[in-house]
Image (cartoon, grey):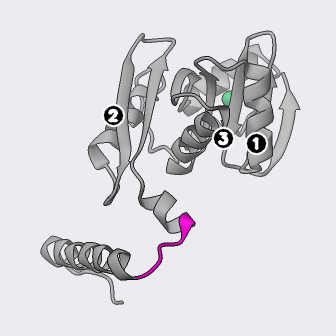
Amino acid sequence: MSPPHSPHRRQTLTALFACGVAGLAGVAPVRAEDAARRAPRWLELASTHTGEVLSVAYRSGAGLVGEALSGLQHLLRDHRNNQQHPMDVGLYDLLADLADRAGVEPRFQIISGYRSPASNAALHERSSGVAVHSMHLEGRAMDVRLHGVDCARLAQLALAQSRGGVGYYRRSDFVHVDTGRIRSWQG
Ligand SMILES: [Zn+2]
C-alpha cells in the first residue's frame, strides 16, 4: 500500500482498515495474539516525585489512544526540568502484562521515567550506578513499583518476559525495566 498523502486520505484508510478488521472478526477465527493486541489496555501511573496520578486506557479496541499517550508522556517527564520525550509503547505493554502475570491491577509507582541528558549527566556524576547512555534518555526505561507486589517478585516476572533489561534495586525497593538488550543486574 502506498503511503497516505493527506490527513483526509489517512483518515479514510484508517476507517477502511478498521471496517475490514471488524468485518473479518465476525467470520474468521481471531488469533489470540491479534485479539490481545486489539483488547483495551489501561495503566495507572503515580509519580513519586510530583504526586501526579493518571489512570488511562492507552489502547482501545481501535488501537493506541493518542490523548492517553500524551498524558502518560507528561507524567513520565523529567521532573527536574519538565522536559518530555516520546515513550516506547512497548514499556506500557510490558507493565500491563506484568500486572496480568502478578494477578493484580496495573497500578504502578514511577520512581523514574524519561531522563534528560542534563539530569543523567548530573546523576552519573553522583552515582556510578547511573549509566552514561541510560535507556531512560531514549524514553525506553522506567523505574517502578507495582502496587501489591513485592519488588523481588516483580523483577522475577520481568525477567521471565525476556523483553529487555531488568534491574532489581533491593535497597531502594524498585525495579528498572527497559526495552533494550536482554540483560539483568542488581543495584
Ligand atoms: Zn532505571
Q: What residue sits right under mark 1 in the picture?
A: 165
Q: What quarter of the picture does the N terminus occupy?
A: bottom left
Q: Residue furthest bottom?
A: 1
Tell me the kind of residue under disc 3: Met
Any magenta on residue 82? no
Q: Quick check: can you spot residue 12?
A: yes
Residue at screen point 20% across, 73% down: 15
Tell me the kind of residue under disc 2: Gly
Q: Residue furthest left?
A: 8
Tell me the kind of residue under disc 1: Gly
Residue at screen point 62% across, 17% down: 148
Sort mark 2 into few (<14), some (14-19) or many (20+) by Cα contacts within 10 Å. some
The image shows residue 25 at horizontal and vertical percentages of: 36, 74
Cα distance in 3D space between marks 1 and 3? 9 Å
Q: Do the residues labelled 1 and 3 touch (CB within 8 Å)?
A: yes
Q: Do the residues labelled 1 and 2 touch (CB within 8 Å)?
A: no
Q: What residue sits right under mark 2 in the picture?
A: 71
Residue 135, label in figure: 3
Sort mark 3 into few (<14), some (14-19) or many (20+) by Cα contacts within 10 Å. some
Cα distance in 3D space between marks 3 and 2? 21 Å
Of pointers 1 and 3, the one earlier in the residue sequence: 3
Sort mark 1 into few (<14), some (14-19) or many (20+) by Cα contacts within 10 Å. some
